[in-house]
């Protein structure tokens, strides 16, 4: 049985686990002041080429979105996003729990189009009743999106320009950032740091046991962030837990490691190599599903989440060998299904899956 | 240098770390449905002799208090506690953030006296303007308290009876529960399960990297707990992280382990042996500080947090060898200081500290 | 100059003002316990043929929606409505401020179609990830809608049945209820009382200085409503203010009053006669605008809000005589405009407007 | 039967009612933009000698406190007050509902002593764990206090200086301000405008049907106040309702009015004369109760709320003639009782009460 259900079903990437073990006996400060978190912050600043950046470590994605958006929004502001956005659909109303409206606009391939955003903002600011409406304070994007799609650098730049024209913050949710960076032709950590006002580097789905790293690239954070984060129940006493893990992920890959060889990633940051590995395997799956098996993509995803339209009659035999999620019915006889690779998917597994359909 | 600053400055107890490592490659379900969390729940139910208990794993103490109190309180209800309570002082207003008043009553040795509670409730329910006041919905206690003191079984029973007389829930914060159980003559996990409506078994300060286990001993949980917890940003995708750690802590100690020998804890639950170990060392410190060095206790604590009144002139030399926290000034020439042992304090360290003062 | 800008630009209906004056010197209880509120509640129960009904008086529409929805929703529940709903657009996020998501579905003529609701709910309850989504707890409708349109009795019945099939509450916002009741062929107060779980009888736009009457027709109110309402800052100390006004509005019209004659409303409840008066005048406007002036309706409204598409070239001359609101541009040369009658619009004014265009 | 139960049991002061009537047919703008509110704001600015002041009209006291404090506090800030403060005791947790902690310090005669405040703040800002505690953002006082007592000008100045030293806002709740101003030797509206950062001029208990006027004397209001207020459900569509009432209260008393004669208040602002009238009557009651009847004051109040310790055996006969509230038991045989005068208490009533005890 091969497991392609999701990217958060395993423990931690070996480098993460190893670093947790080798640092276990060191005594540190707490509440974000520990040396591991400090060093992880330094490594992230370097990788982002953002020497002024402020970095905060939180535990999970929903917590990060709700906490950080609440920290940066004024009380009367809401957050704009597309209707498929994670904060709009799958966070049990965590953003609204903090008192802010999620204002959902129609998506295009899981993305918020600059045109859509621009038109909405123009209409809002021209509306005489705007003060009776929720004022937009930030735009939320996911990179990659919930459907595995990617914004190009040009698209992000356009969205960023619109945000800044209207005084909004651009916030990017990078729960699966490693996979997005690996699949993108032009979006890099330094590009994100220049383009977004806030973004987070996802850990949970990209190799940690838990933890996400929130980056304010320009260092312009709200006052009293420690109090704000604690008030949301999001401050770990033993902050090293996440710090150690991100220190591992933002270290360089040893030249002789299998991952370095496989992804030609000598001297590469482990976080980036994890993404390349998973995307490379996802692309092999894609060729198998489309070229060999003739399944149409449900959506054209270049990242580690792959969606195909499978005839219902094929599902039982597929399930015998592969674990995957059904996404939604497409027709009475066809179902869109999701297949996910991750840092934990091995080359051997994909080899074996390919052999299944020889 | 010996470190007695706090009980959350190290990584994880060796049994916890080992179990994280040995389970790392197993694939599991997520969001609380993983097999490790399931088994940890089973072990906790057994240890509590509460077969009906429902158990939830959260990440940290403040998160647990705010999330669970918000889950069980009606919107218009507040929570009663004593003025030194962690939720009243040191959680950055996390409970109020969820809309509930923390109603603080005077403490006695860091504890809420049954008499104090009883009088307040009698007055509240006799007050004709009660509907204009925040209705009490729960009582919050810490065991051990923030000052290291302990409620006796009789005290807890009395508080529980008052709660139930007035229809309030009794919630016990066990951030340092291992140390409390070890030091108490009569309070056990089964006793807590019979006496409290909700309590949590602290992990972060008692051997895990992160994580607390909330127990509803009677199984009477609010509906849709998963949604409620996620809405607070407190649901881990990779829930196994905490599940694995509590599975380790609630396993039995191997007979040949050093801890088993030291605490005569053969076949003992690791969580309990951790508490005994730290309390045993704390009692050795106590004898050293009071009998040998002649320092008066600032408060009489039987648990792993020890507080002594130290002449300011002694502080520099003490600091050369021992890391500790100053708690508060007691007089112009004396300071109350806190010395904390934990699972991470070794017998060797205490031996060496004793030798310092020979 | 004739004023058709809105229905909240005047003081109070003469019967309301008179009753405020004649009761001014009587001393009463407060916080909802006054005899005027009690009597107003009795009159409303009678008018609704709902002897079990519980009635609460609040001050304004947004306050009422946010307070009552927060009172009846579970913490993790949201409220469904159509995208044009007042709570979704024009309440500055007051519902989200209380922590609840407003889940907006596409509207049809300003209404939520039963089919739209039904399909959404079916999909929600079939979704395996439903626990990660905001659970719907209530459906919010406006009667009449923000665009002046009306649900038929059949449409409301269908929506009500869907709500109850899925365990949702049906909440109807009657900010302009008087006008809706007057224009509807089949929706009456007793019908609303049988069909909705909660509805409010609008005062501010229908003749009071301020105040709305919330009706729970079956009397099944949440516990501790006084505390809940006060917690929202919505409890008036001098509750008689709204009580007196609703006592006036739900009294019978004297047979010799001009309104009784005009609306053939002898022995009629004043609130209902107010609606008939305004709708009668709105229908005269409608004939004038469509038949005489040839303007197309922007939306087909049978109530006191009338919307017409006016050539931009006609706007200046129209504005010389009539005050009205521009609603939205319809084409580069045409604008949708809103003309509103109310209890304060006189027959003389409409006579005069008609003469303008002879 | 003479009614001294409270100051919110009657309708409105005759000047208020008259003005509501005489302005009823004028058409105005809404949501705070109406001409009556504009003029009332101008009159208040003049009375306060604060030409830069911004003034907002809300409906009731609890609403005002919760809305305005939430508007001016940062999300992570709380409000300091004394333990008897209205926001701490009798607002059903409305401030906490908005997410802010009410931090209660011990009172002295219902007042917050400068010394108490100063010591607390010094300790807070010296505390190394301050970031884990709720940061104080404002100080809340009532003038007069809930017990009828008054701060002197010196006391208010001292409190104000402490606030500003630590960067806190000074907010004064003037629910009964008319009575406080009348009884104070040195506190005036201009003094309050110079000393407080925000204060509100109470209407409900001082002559209006409903409504309170919030004054920001320096005009330094948070951005987007209309949205903020609406989000709290506190924005009246028909804002004129409160505007008209405050326009009446801040008009000058006609020279031939009975009130002018009685309070020697020719050319006086009605609001101030209302206070003088009620306090004059309260002082007559005081002489009666203490000198004639020999009852000891429960607290020494110079304002319209009078508290006396009455032997329980006297209560039945007293109740035959006078309506009043029992406050609290003082001993097994004595009860503290509250007697309240107001704008609605007539000189005739007090004459008659005095005659009762001749």
Image (cartoon, coloured by chain):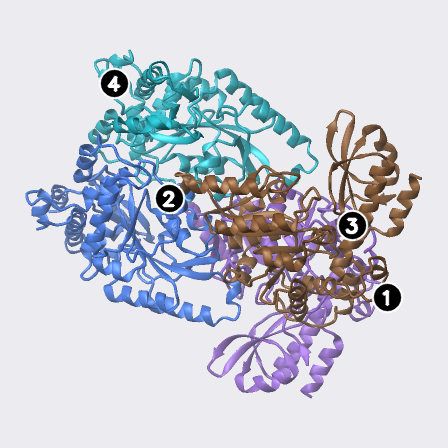
Chain colours: A purple, B brown, C blue, D cyan
Cα separation, mark 1 vs mark 2, equals 77 Å
Quadrant in which residue B46 is drawn: bottom right
Query: Disc 1 marks which residue?
Result: B256
Mark 1 and mark 2, same subunit?
no
Give x and y (percent) for residue C30: 31, 37
Mark 4 and mark 3, same subunit?
no
Q: Quadrant of the N terminus of chain A?
A: bottom right
In contact (CB < 8 Å): disc 1 and disc 2: no
Query: Which of the marked residues, 3 or 1, is nearer the chain's N terminus?
Result: 1
Say which chain tag 1 marks: B
Closer-to-camera residue (B291/D338) = B291
Q: Which mark is residue D347?
A: 4
Horizontal placement of C96 versus D268: left or right? Answer: right
- Identified at 30% across, 39% down, the residue is C239
Query: Disc 2 marks which residue?
Result: A128
Query: Disc 3 marks which residue?
Result: B279
Say which chain tag 4 marks: D
């Amino acid at each position: 049985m091969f497991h392609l259900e999701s990217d958060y079903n395993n423990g931690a990437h070996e480098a993460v686990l190893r670093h947790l073990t080798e640092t276990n006996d060191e005594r540190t400060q707490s509440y974000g002041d520990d040396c591991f978190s400090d060093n992880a912050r330094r490594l992230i600043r370097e990788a982002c080429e953002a020497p002024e950046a402020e970095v905060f470590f939180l535990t999970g994605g929903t917590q990060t979105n709700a906490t950080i958006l609440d920290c940066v929004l004024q009380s009367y502001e809401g957050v704009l996003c597309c209707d498929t956005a994670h904060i709009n659909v799958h966070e049990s109303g965590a953003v609204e729990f903090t008192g802010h409206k999620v204002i959902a606009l129609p998506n295009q391939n899981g993305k918020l189009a600059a045109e859509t955003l621009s038109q909405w903002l123009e209409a809002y600011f021209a509306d005489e009743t705007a003060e009776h409406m929720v004022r937009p304070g930030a735009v939320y994007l996911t990179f990659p999106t919930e459907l595995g799609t990617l914004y190009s650098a040009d698209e992000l730049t356009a969205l960023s320009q619109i945000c800044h024209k209207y005084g909004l913050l651009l916030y990017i949710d990078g729960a699966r950032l490693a996979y997005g960076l690996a699949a993108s032709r032009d979006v890099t950590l330094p590009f994100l740091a220049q383009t977004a006002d806030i973004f987070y580097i996802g850990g949970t789905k990209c190799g940690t046991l838990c933890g996400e790293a929130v980056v304010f690239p320009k260092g312009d954070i709200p006052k009293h962030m420690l109090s704000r984060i604690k008030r949301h129940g999001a401050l770990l006493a033993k902050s090293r837990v996440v710090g150690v893990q991100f220190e591992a992920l933002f270290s360089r890959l040893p030249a002789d490691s299998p991952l370095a060889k496989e992804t030609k990633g000598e001297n590469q940051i482990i976080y980036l190599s994890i993404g390349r590995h998973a995307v490379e395997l996802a692309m092999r799956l894609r060729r198998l599903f489309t070229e060999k098996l003739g399944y149409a993509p449900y959506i054209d995803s270049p990242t580690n989440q792959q969606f195909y339209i499978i005839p219902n009659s094929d599902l039982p035999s597929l399930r015998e060998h592969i674990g995957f999620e059904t996404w939604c019915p497409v027709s009475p006889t066809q179902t869109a299904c999701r297949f996910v690779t991750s840092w934990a998917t091995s080359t051997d597994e994909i080899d074996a899956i390919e052999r299944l359909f020889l």
